[in-house]
Amino acid sequence: MKRRAALFGLSALFTGACSKIADSRTGQSLFDLAEGWHRKAHRALADREALAPEYSKADISPVFKGNGSVTVESDIYADQLARGFPDWRLQVRGLVKNPLSLSLDSLRAMPQRTQITRHDCVEGWSAIGEWRGPQLSQLLEAAEVLPEANFIVFYCADILYGKRYYESIDMVDAYHPQTIVAHELNGDPLPEKNGAPLRMRIERQLGYKHPKYLTAIEAVSSLDDIEGGKGGFWEDNYGYQWYAGM
């Protein structure tokens, strides 16, 4: 727990100072160096398969707040939400041999992982919830990711501050057993405010790395030509760390 707390503190330190760091080219270079050190230190200290702490049902928080986007402002989403998302599809594409288009029913029919974990927001709040869904690795294996893929990019239906939300992780976190495509929270379908119908759970990283309203998963070799090139909405626009491991 001390090691986890130290790494979490490092994440909060660098992320909280992001706007000042991004003000100059020298500052951004220092930020990039710090992030690289953080990722290497985390990988060195924690086994690649090491699990984030899991909890009991008695530990589940009475409220799991929504944060960032709490809905998708579109008539299509409102219609799908009202009808239980019968036409929602999750695309698995990019550097894969077999692109996939998966319905919610097909995702529910896969082997499921249930995990009770703590969500740590960079704003300083935490909550414990029970998540359920197939492991991302199952989808990637079914799609047969090609060897040249280095990252997995997540695309979302929500627009935040006028820009499309997206995130990304490396292949270590993509194949981690606790990285799941969640469709349930605390035994019920995901609430709207928490990302219905699908969101990612990447349990060894801070909350902004867990994208909601998921529509597509893409295997890529580089992040350079995607949106702002930094690997995520908060990274592109507000200087957050791309690697937010705890």
Image (tube, grey):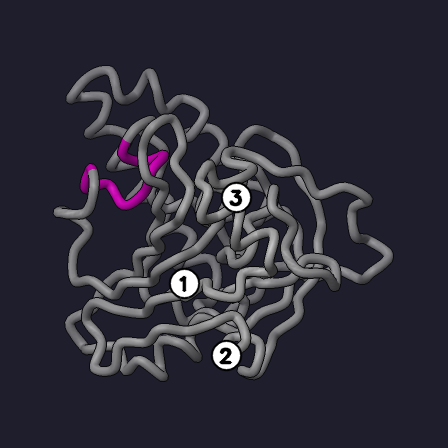
- Secondary structure found at label 1: helix
Quarter location, residue 125: top right
- Compare marks 3 and 2 and give the one earlier in the sequence: 2
Tell which of 61 and 83 is nearer to you: 83
Q: Residues within 10 Å of mark 1 (few under 14, many from 20)?
A: many
Tag 3 residue? 207
- Compare marks 2 and 1 and give the one earlier in the sequence: 2
**Location of residue 237 in the rendering, given as x and y in whole percent from the top left corner:** 29, 28
Going by the image, does 242 lie left or right of 224?
A: right
Residue visible at 70% across and 43% down?
Answer: 64
Question: Closer to the camera: disc 3 or disc 2?
Answer: 2
Magenta segment: does it hold 231?
yes
Tag 1 residue? 173
Question: Closer to the camera: disc 3 or disc 1?
Answer: 3
Tag 2 residue? 106
Q: Which residues are magenta?
A: 228-236
**Location of residue 62 in the rendering, given as x and y in whole percent from the top left corner:** 82, 44
Label 3, label 2: how far apart the Cα atoms are: 26 Å
Amino acid on which the number 3 mark rests in the picture: Gly
Label 2, label 1: how far apart the Cα atoms are: 23 Å
Going by the image, does 21 lie left or right of 29?
A: right
Residue visible at 33% across and 16% down?
Answer: 20
Q: Name the mark on residue 211.
A: none
Tell which of 48 and 158 is nearer to you: 158
Residue visible at 76% across and 41% down?
Answer: 63
Residue visible at 25% across and 65% down?
Answer: 219
For the residues labelled 3 and 2, say whether their Cβ atoms are less than 8 Å apart.
Answer: no
